[in-house]
Image: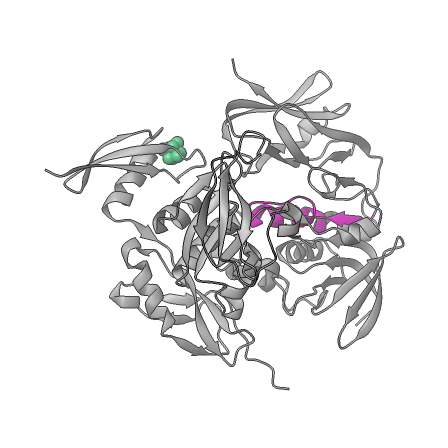
Amino acid sequence: MAVEKRALTCIVCPKGCAMTATITDGLMTELTGNSCPRGKKYAEEEILAPKRMLTSTVRVLNGELALLPVVSKSSLPKGRILACVEELRKITVLAPIAEGQVIVTNILGLGVDIVASRSMPAAEKD
Amino acid sequence: MSESYDVIIIGGGPAGLSAAYSAWENGAKKILVIERDRELGGILQQCIHNGFGLHHFKEELTGPGYAHRCMELIKDKPEIETLIDTMVLEITQDKTVVAVNPKKGLLELHAKTIILTMGCRERTRGAIRIPGERPAGVFTAGAAQRMVNMEGYLPGKKAVILGSGDIGLIMARRMSLEGCKVEAVLEICSFSNGLTRNIVQCLEDYDIPLYLSHTIVKIHGSERVTGVTVAKVDERMQPLPGTEFDIECDTVLLSVGLIPENELSRGLDLKMEPLTSGPVVDQRRETSKPGIFAAGNVVHVHDLVDFVSEEAEIAGKFAALTAQGMLEGELKHVEVTTGDGIRTCVPQRLSLPEEGETLRLFMRVGAPEQKVRLEVTSGDTLIVSKLLPFAKPSEMIALNLPAEKTKLISGDLKVALKREA
Ligand code: SF4
């Protein structure tokens, strides 16, 4: 039996309770420090399947700026965030781009699209 | 383009755009937004992370996404004009706005009312006096953010961040994602001024240590930063001898606070408040000079853009009504003062009609608090009180005062914390 203690800070409300979880074979078996049940739910998720939104940029050609900011449509597994960023590094798009336009469909097969978080007009030609 | 307007708005960030929309909704026919950057949206355009808009747009947006929403609201409205690439040089006492634009040259525009929404800027190394030479590699966090998110440059490979405000935390994650090793975040206070969510998701996720009660005592390097000496500080924030240690790095980012950008306000001789570094406003966001309004970070630095929009909508509404001559009747003026535990409160004064007016107070506490009662009193009358389970200096407290309560205000208003026994 692998027993481990992990410190977590609840981010569900501004109180920010400092919690300690006991993890037995990958499952949370005890939690202290939370002031309400929402903290427990948060801790369970953080231990079993933590998720994060991803915001980054991709290179854009012919645009008013060098970079286009992008955002994941929903959250991604925390452990795959760096791999997703690597994937975005390979991408170059061509302006004009509309806000919300899909830049990568189903990134790394995780079932989440990456979309443009702003519009990018084409650069004006002088 | 015309030369006279109902409402001229200085600054096209979230405050300016929200004010313009609200002025339009409230009947102003000629509205102009002046922006000095090459596009509207203000600083949000470089804040590519998400977490904006939950209150105002009821959905979680990125900074550019929030700016986009604001721009959508004002677009295709013949009553609203925008002027980008335009720098306002002066606002005169008779509400003439003097500005320059590379294509139109010098402009002199007249307004019935003006709304100041110039936002804020970052404190610099000079402002906090760190000893050492002046090597390359020291940036404000916001300047680095613009480089990384808009221009496509990484400021360095190994960074130390001074200050644990939200911009510093967000940049710690952003630099890590782009391949820069963030060695540490240092905070001179014994608590962080950043949101807990950012401490967890920007530092803990990337194993970046946060040193509370620590600061940089020296930056090393002459051509380029080569490292910093860090020391622990005492309660008075003075470095403790013997606690120094060195961190090797090529970049130092400063996230050491924001200051409202008020050169134009000072030119107008507006009454200023030293603690917020912004103009004194009433609940309608009118400054000490009739017809000149102010909202957003130019009044006091906000932690949520949603509150910036809310405040700007108030300013937009009352600027529009004033411009149309629709506000009449005697107003009773009272001051809002802060007592125990409350550091700042906006508005700083109230201009109340006979029947009262629904309004919201925005406050910051001086230090973290738990289980305190926030009390708003006028003389011996308790106007409103609210129990706060906890309060942090980094999170602004908003308190509603309904019209039937503000009617009861007889003299100056005082906001203070009362500790529960
Ligand atoms: S445990 Fe409950 S009270 Fe504590 S931070 Fe989480 S949601 Fe807030």
Q: Residue A33: say if magenta.
A: no
User: Is B277 located above or below residue A116 in the figure?
Assistant: above
Q: Residue furthest left?
A: A1
Q: Nearer the viewer, residue B93 or B148?
A: B148
In x, y percent, where is residue A43?
Answer: 29, 39
Q: Work out whether residue B72 or residue B229 is closer to the camera in this orientation and state it.
A: B229
Q: Quadrant of ligand 1?
A: top left
Front-lying residue, B373 or B262: B262
Tell whether position B299 is magenta: yes
Residue B421: give x, y in percent of width and height: 51, 13
Q: Is residue B321 visible?
A: no
**Whole-percent x and y of residue A44?**
26, 40
Residue numbers of the magenta segment: B291-316
- Residue at 63% of width from left, 58% of height from top? B13
Asked which quadrant contains residue B354, the reply is top right
A95 horizontally vs B339: left or right:
left
Residue B116 percent across, percent down from the top left: 74, 53
Residue B76, compared with residue B205, is above or below; it is below
